[in-house]
Amino acid sequence: MNVGAGAGSYEPDHLEVTAVEPSATMRAQRPAGAAPAVDAVAEDLPFGDRAFDAALASFTIHQWRDLRGGLREVRRVARGPVVILTCDPAALERSWLTDYAPQMIATEASRYPRIADVRSGLGGTVTVEQLPIPLACVDGFSEAYYGRPEALLDPGARRANSAWSFVSENAVEAFERTLRADLASGAWDGRYGHLRTQPTFDGSLRLIVGRP
């Protein structure tokens, strides 16, 4: 089961998958041939106990209304591991964006649950692994551009991270103005230029695996 499946970007294509996605807009974006999507939420899954071999939740738990309730439900329907991809809010400040978009970073940190709360909600045996972010990461979260700052001057790139939608227009304009000026003057490269060739970045990305 892939809960909070969205358009299916993180789904394995070599396994039988049941997707759970409450947004009709996101369900409509699923490509032809994708796993069938059930209109439901993590906190109220319409499946029997231990119905799935495993469960996946990628970049979704921060959108759940009841984290503990959702984790309890996911744990109930999965007889095997529960795999969660999320961000550690305590590590978001490692990004250079802390200096250029502090409102966005604060907003992002306020949305993601603490790793300790995820551990507690899952119960059983839980492991947490820090995932290095590759320089050419094709995902749209902000840290993916740790070595490509120019990309975040594109409003389309920012829209891929919903935290930007909660930031005031004045703050976004200040971000663009300051970053453009610092890229033009070389100030950004003076402080962060080493990131342009750094193969990976140890940011906030976390892989959490809970087992019974």
Image (cartoon, rainbow, N blue to C red):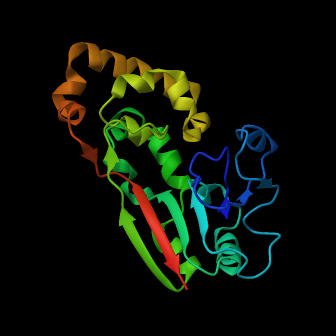
Front residue of 52 and 204: 52
Number of marks = 0
Horizontal side of 139 relative to 196 (left or right) equals: right
Q: In the displayed image of the protein, which residue is found farthest to the top?
A: 184
Residue 148, horizontal then vertical, whole percent: 33, 29
Q: Is residue 55 above or below residue 126?
A: above
Residue at 61 percent across and 61 percent down: it is 15
Q: Is residue 206 above or below residue 82?
A: above
Residue 67, horizontal then vertical, whole percent: 64, 68
- In this rendering, does residue 175 appear at all? no
Which image quarter is the C terminus in? bottom right
- In this rendering, does residue 67 appear at all? yes
Residue at 53 percent across and 64 percent down: it is 84
Which image quarter is the N terminus in? bottom right
Residue at 69 percent across and 70 percent down: it is 70
Front residue of 59 and 164: 59
Horizontal side of 56 relative to 42 (left or right) equals: left
Residue 44, horizontal then vertical, whole percent: 79, 69
Front residue of 5 and 12: 12
